[in-house]
Structures are given as structure tokens and as C-alpha cells.
Image (cartoon, rainbow, N blue to C red):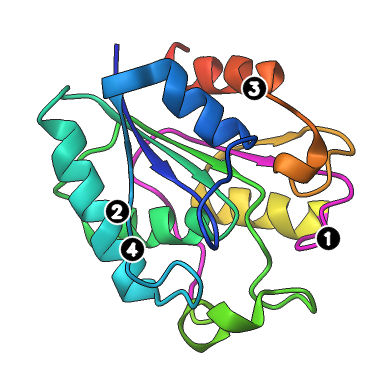
Amino acid sequence: MAAYVIIPGIDGSDEQHWQTLWERQWGTSAVRLSPASWSTPDLDDWVDAVQDAYDDASRRDSRIVLVAHSLGCWAASTWLNRNSSSPAGGAFLVAPPDPDGPAFPRQAASTFTEVSAQPLRCPALVVGSADDPYSTPEAAAGFAARWQARWHLAGACGHINSASGLGSWQHGRELLDSLTHP
């Protein structure tokens, strides 16, 4: 078993989001980050929140898997690149928005547009959607390549969030399992 660090996007994941549903299923094996800047994201604040959640999760289990959605993918990847001494067992990165794309959230533009996809020091899987309004499949596949992560196109799932109507997203759990139990 592993411990999971849940890293949502802007404003967190609501009650119907697959991250929240998985967190409930995992119980005490899951820790959700709590940045002070949920609505107006500051990259350093979010990276610090990843560290705090990682530290909390590492008290529960020695193998930690990051489960990130949307802007949380950039917080997770930045944290991984800044903290090579904190080994993660894996990074599950779902629907990363394109910082150079026209729909990138304005409220995150001041600090998150300077992020770059660099090789990650753990097994990683990037999941994208054919019709994500925040990133084209080509852009998301490019992030995966630069992160040296596996790439999976999940089909037409929008932003792979609550509005996508995925519920507990069984396909996502299978993808996560393929990362954590190769």
C-alpha cells in the first residue's frame, strides 16, 4: 500500500470530483494539500503545500504517490524538481493546463506561467483529454515527453473534472494502478 498526496487544481476539487471520491476511499492513506492561495494560485505557496502534505503522508507510509489534477500537475512537477531528496513513488498527472495556451487561468498567470516541464525523478503518467479546454492533446503529450512520463489520451473527457461526469473514474484508477503496480 502507498500513501497518496492529493493535489487539486484551483479552488480544490469539489465533492463530485474523482480526486475527492478517491480520497474518501483511501481514508487515512490520503493527504490533500492546503495552499493559502487556492483561488489566486501562487506557485511557491502551492509547492510549499505539496511539501507539507508529503511530510504528513510520509508519516503514514514510506511510499508516496502524488495524484495531481490541472494546475496541481505543475505544483507537483515543480516540487519534484526542487526536491530530489524527497523520493516519490510516482506522479499521476491529469489534465495539465497549457501555460502558453489561450485558456490558461488568469489568476495563476503571475507565477505559474514560468513553469517548465523537466524530467521527473520518479515514474510518472500524464493523462489528457481530446477535448480539454485548457490544453490540446498535443501540448499535454509534449509535457509528458519533457517530464519523461508515460502518456495516455483518455478520449473526449473535457477537463477530466466534475463537469466531465466521471464519478469515481474507474478508468483513472486502472491507470493509476498501472503506474503504482507495473
| Residue linked to disc 1 | 133
Whether residue 87 is visible to the viewer of this picture, yes or no, is yes
Circle 3 crowding by C-alpha within 10 Å: few under 14, some 14–19, many from 20? some
* Measured Cα–Cα span from mark 2 to mark 3: 23 Å
Q: Who comes first in sequence, dot 1 or dot 2?
A: 2
> In the drawing, what numbered circle is on residue 168?
3
Mark toward the viewer: 2 or 3 = 3
Q: In this view, does 113 lie to the left or right of 54?
A: right
Q: Who comes first in sequence, dot 3 or dot 4?
A: 4
Q: In which quarter of the image is residue 28?
A: top left
Considering depth in this image, is 136 or 32 the residue closer to the camera? 32
* Measured Cα–Cα span from mark 1 to mark 4: 25 Å
Q: Who comes first in sequence, dot 4 or dot 2?
A: 4
User: How many marks on residues?
Assistant: 4
| Residue linked to disc 2 | 50
The stretch in magenta equals 115-136
Give the residue at x 45% y 16%: 25
* Measured Cα–Cα span from mark 1 to mark 3: 21 Å
Give the residue at x 67% y 16%: 170
Give the residue at x 53% y 35%: 19
The spot of residue 45 in percent (x, y) is 30, 71
Query: In this picture, is 110 found above or below 161?
Result: below
Q: Which amino acid does label 1 sit on?
A: Pro
* Measured Cα–Cα span from mark 4 to mark 2: 8 Å
Secondary element under disc 1, as helix, strand or loop, is: loop
Q: What residue type is labelled 4?
A: Pro
Which residue is the extreme one toward the left?
Answer: 59
| Residue linked to disc 4 | 35
Whether label 4 touches label 2, CB < 8 Å: no
Secondary element under disc 4, as helix, strand or loop, is: loop
Whether label 1 touches label 3, CB < 8 Å: no
Q: What residue type is labelled 3?
A: Ser
